[in-house]
Image: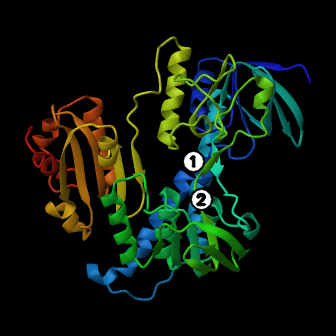
Amino acid sequence: MSHPEEYDVVVLGSGRARFFAWSLASQGKRVAVVERRNLAGSCPTIACAPSKNVIHGAKVANYFRRGAEFGIAAGDWKVEMPAVRDRKRKMVDGIVARNVNAYRESGAELVKGQGRFVGPRTIEVTADDGTRTLRGEVVVICTGSRARIDPIPGLAESRPMTHIEALGLDRVPKHLLILGGGYVGLEMAQALRRFGSRVTVIERNDALVHREDRDVSEALRELFDDEGIEVLTATPVARVEGRSGESVRLHATRGVIEGSDLLVASGRTPNTDGIGLETAGIERDDRGFIKVDDRLRTTAAGVWAVGDCAGSPHFTHIADDDVRVIRDNLAGIDRVTTGRLVPFCLFTDPELARIGLSESEARSRGIAYRLAKIPVAAFIRPWTLSESRGFYKTLVAADSDRILGFTAFAPEAGAVMTIVQTAMTARLPYTALRDAILVHPTMAEGLAALFRAVPARP
C-alpha cells in the first residue's frame, strides 16, 4: 500500500454527503469525495429527479389525451420517446454541471474511481490513470443502494430493466410487466401507461403499497383500473423465461403472464459489498446494511455512514437529515436519528403523501386516536382542475389536540402534507390549522375543512 494522502474528511460516495464536503472545504478543511460513476449522486442523475422529469412528461401526454375535456381540439399528436429521454438528459447534464462547479468553488477534491477500504479510515481509489490511497481523520460512507434482483430462476438471465434503464427508454414498450407494487413500480407503471404502453403490475403481497392503510391501497388500485393498468396482487413469481425487450414470460401463481418488457421494482439492496468494510472493522447486518448507532457512527472509530447504505429510510430527504446528524455530532452537538418525523410522497397522479402515523400503525401500537377524513371533492380547488379524485385524512390524539398523522391522496399532496408536518414539528394543536385563514381556492384550503371534521374528545 502506498503512503496515504492525509485529509480532514474523506467521503466515499457522492450522495448527499457531498453537500457536507463542500461546506467543510469552504471552511478551509481538506476534503475529498470518492465517486466511481455519478458525480452528483444517484438522486439527481438516475433516480429522483429523472423519474419526476419523465413522470411530468407523462402527465403532459395525459393532458393531450384529455384535451377535449378542457375544450381543446385534440388534433394529431404522438409520444416521441427519444425527445422524452433527451429532455431528461438535458436536465441531468445541467445538474451535473452545477455539481462540478460546486466542487471547484468549494475547494473539495473530487477523486474519480472505485474506492475500497484497505485499513482503518483508509481508502484506496483505483481508476484508469492509476491508484491513490486516502486517509481521513473522519470518513463518511455514502454509497447508497441499487435495485434488487431477487433470486427467481431465470430473472437475471432475462436482463430486466431497473428504473435506470426504464428512464432511458427511446421507445414505448408494447406490454410492460412490472415486478413490484411499491413506489418505483407504481410511478413507472402510470408514466409508461400514459406514454402508450400496455402495463401489468405484479405484486407478491395482497395489496399495493401494502404497508399503507387499506383505503390508500384501494384508492390506488381504482386509479390504475381507471387508467387501464392491470394489477395482479398476491401473485408470487416462481420462474422467468425469455428476454426483456423481446418477449418475457412470468410463471406465477395465477398462471403464465406474458409481455414484451420486464421492469424489476421489488426493493433495494445496499451498495456495501466489495468496498473492504471488514478490512476497516466496519460491520454489516444480515441484510448488508452498515451497522450504525443512533448518531450514525459505525463500529469503526472515526467512520460514519449515512442514507440507504446505513439502513435509513430510503428517501433523499432522510439522507440529508443524516448528514445534519453527523455534522452536529462532529461539532459537539448531541443529535440522534431516533424520533424523527419521516415524510414520504409517491409521485403518482394524484400524489400520495403521508407524515406521522397511519391508522394501521396507530392500532398496532395501541394508540387511541380520533379520525377525520374528507374527499377532496368537498372543496373547490380540485374542481377547477378537473381533478376531484382522492381524500385527506388525519389522526388526532384521543386525549389531546396533538396531530398524530396525516395522509393525502390528492393533487399537490406532497406540498399540502408539508404544511401539516410543519404544524406537527412545532407541536401545534390541530385547532391551529382548523382555525387558520387559508387562501381560497387552494389545495391547502382543504386542511381547514379536514380539521373541522375531527370529532370532539370523548
In front: label 2 or label 1: 1
Q: Split into 4 quadrants, where in the image is the C terminus?
A: top left
Q: Quick one: SS at disc 2?
A: helix
- Measured as percent of width and height from the top left, residue 418 is found at 32, 43
Residue in front for this viewpoint, 318 or 136: 318
Horizontal side of 144 relative to 361 (left or right) equals right
Looking at the picture, does residue 295 appear above or below residue 17? above
What residue is shown at x 57% (from left), y 61% (from top)?
88
Name the disc covering residue 303, or none.
none
- The residue identified by callout 1 is 43
Identified by mark 2, the residue type is Lys
Looking at the picture, does residue 261 appear above or below residue 11? below
Identified by mark 1, the residue type is Cys
- The residue identified by callout 2 is 90
- Measured as percent of width and height from the top left, residue 347 is found at 42, 58
Residue neighbourhood size for the residue with mark 1, other residues' Cα within 10 Å, grouped as few (<14), some (14–19), many (≥20): some
Query: Is residue 243 at all visible to an observer of this figure?
Result: no
- Measured as percent of width and height from the top left, residue 372 is found at 17, 50
What residue is shown at x 59% (from left), y 59% (from top)?
90
What residue is shown at x 38% (from left), y 53% (from top)?
212
Q: How is the image coloured?
A: rainbow
Q: Find the distance from the CA under tag 2 to the CA under tag 1.
A: 15 Å
